[in-house]
Amino acid sequence: MRGLRWLVLACAAGSVACGEPTDTTSNGRIRIGVTTSGADPQTDEYLVTLDGARPLSIAPNGSGVYDDVPEGTHVVHLFALADNCAVSGTTSPRSVNVRGGRVIEIDFTVVCRAPITGGFRVVVTTAGSPTDEDGYQLSVAGAPLRHIGVNAEETYQGLKPGLHLVTLKDVADFCEVHGGNPQPYTVVPGKTVRVAIRVGCGVGSGPVD
């Protein structure tokens, strides 16, 4: 009983280390826990790095461990989050101080919100000869005018949900946009909708498969 009383007093005075070391080595461990919530939570795994290396995959509501971490200050970075998700309440990257033989607990909270915008992937294909060598002008309602080649694609993000007109401009007189020009397409929140525009030029200007 006297020995126990001495140990309690020594701990209170700080003259001995009274934590609960995981082992007797000079290195430590870092345990990373992730909690994900929100209206449209991420389902893919996140990535974590330790000092920019040792990549580790962690489930949206899961954990991972770095073993044999040298004593000192280290940086833990949680990334590969969906566009509608963000770390809440703490920072990432995050600095931690590792002490020998101990486990450092790091918890990240990720909050995801329902996407409020969407996008288009516009694919233009041209058949026939001759083609319109200088390409076309691509107009998508809600976005600036862009140049696009005769067989090329452009991706649009951040478009408001709903119906948008997609127009191919500066089309040569000997070419025709099949299916109408402009054409209406619907932006779906959180999605990139494929838009296929087919152009026929000169001889053999029928629709492209």
Image (cartoon, rainbow, N blue to C red):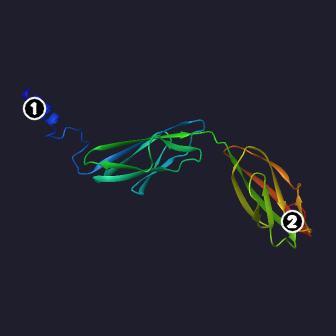
Q: Which residue is tagged 2?
A: 171
- Residue under label 1: 6
Element assignment for label 1? helix
Q: Viewer-proximal residue, 122 or 68?
A: 122
Which residue sits furthest left? 2
Q: Percent x, y for residue 148?
A: 76, 65
- Specify the amino acid type for callout 2: Val
User: What amino acid type should be assigned to the residue bearing mark 1?
Assistant: Trp
**Element type where label 2 sits in the image:** loop
Query: Distance from label 1 to label 2 (Cα)?
Result: 91 Å
Residue 184 or 55: which is nearer the viewer? 184
Q: Residues within 10 Å of mark 2 (few under 14, many from 20)?
A: some
In this picture, residue 135 sits left or right of residue 69: right
Which residue does the image show at 79% across and 58% down from the upper left?
Answer: 139
At x 88% / y 64%, what residue is drawn? 200
Q: Nearer the viewer, residue 167 or 23?
A: 167
